[in-house]
Image (cartoon, rainbow, N blue to C red):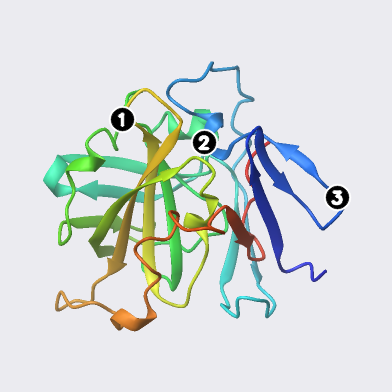
Amino acid sequence: MAAATLVALAALAGWVLGAPGDDTTLAAQLGRYGDALVRVPEAPPPEPSTTTTTAAPSAPALQVEVETIAPGTPVGTLSIPKLGVTVPMLEGIDLWVIDQGSGHWPGTPMPGQRGNLVVGGHRTLYQRPFHDLDQLVEGDLVLMTDTDGATWTYRVRGIVIVPASAVGIVNQSEAHTATLFACHPKGSATHRIVAKLQLLDDAGQPVDAPASLPPLDLGTRPGDDVVHLLPGMEAPPA
């Protein structure tokens, strides 16, 4: 099995990761910070450090520049003008990271880059940036600023509700997209609310043709409980 790709299968008790015949049970990815679950002490954030590697060709064929960034490192800001939300975007999807704003899934693209940028946030805890994610509709804007100060504008394509097992929402494509997700309904972790975004250019037009975008119903179909991890993408946390 190529080291470039891992397949994680969702199970009722958690996620299963590994090659055929090598099953290792992992906690549900959002269970680390699900609003309805018991919170446990987390290790303090490590000292920031950054290294850069280049992903080797793999299936899917998306080539990405992978940055390994210490959890808790600021990687930008996320703003949702319609909801009056502006929060830091930090590296990682652990509890103590998400508590400080929003969490960037390690190994997914940074703002403006090709691929599916994935960001998680709370709905009912701390800054609760995604509390009203259900109020977004097609055409609403989400702004992301990177560490260089550049601002990238994304437009909402749609909102879907998926089972907690639908981990395929983080899968990558060749298009410039972003995925915001949180527990659903509020105060529960049985499902996920998912906002699917596409990048706009300086003229406010989509960067990618409609045919190149992932399907809007991704996460609701058979087989969407499979996630393909590209080089550098972090597996669901244990």
Label 1 crowd bin: few (<14), some (14–19), many (20+), radius 10 Å? some
Q: Regarding mark 2 in the picture, which secondary structure is present there?
A: helix
- Image position, residue 49 (x, y; %): 62, 49
Amino acid type for the residue under numbered disc 1: Arg
Query: Would you name the residue on which mark 3 appears?
Result: 22
- Image position, residue 209 (x, y; %): 30, 83
Q: Between 51 and 210, which is closer to the camera in this rendering?
A: 210
Q: Residue at x 60, y 80 (%)?
A: 61
Q: Residue at x 53, y 57 (%)?
A: 224
Q: Residue at x 29, y 37 (%)?
A: 130
- Image position, residue 60 (x, y; %): 60, 76
Q: Can the viewer see residue 208? A: no
Closer to the chain start, of discs 3 and 1, is: 3
Q: Between 114 and 133, which is closer to the camera in this rendering?
A: 133
Query: Would you name the residue on which mark 1 appears?
Result: 128
How far is mark 3 from mark 2, CA to CA?
23 Å
How far is mark 3 from mark 1, CA to CA?
37 Å
Q: Regarding mark 1 in the picture, which secondary structure is present there?
A: loop
Closer to the chain start, of discs 2 and 1, is: 2
Tell whether 26 sits left or right of 200: right
Q: Residue at x 34, y 63 (%)?
A: 216
User: What label does residue 30 carry, if any?
Assistant: 2
- Image position, residue 84 (x, y; %): 14, 40
Which is in the foreground here, disc 3 or disc 2? 3
Amino acid type for the residue under numbered disc 2: Leu
Q: Can the viewer see residue 153? A: yes
Which is in the foreground here, disc 3 or disc 1? 3
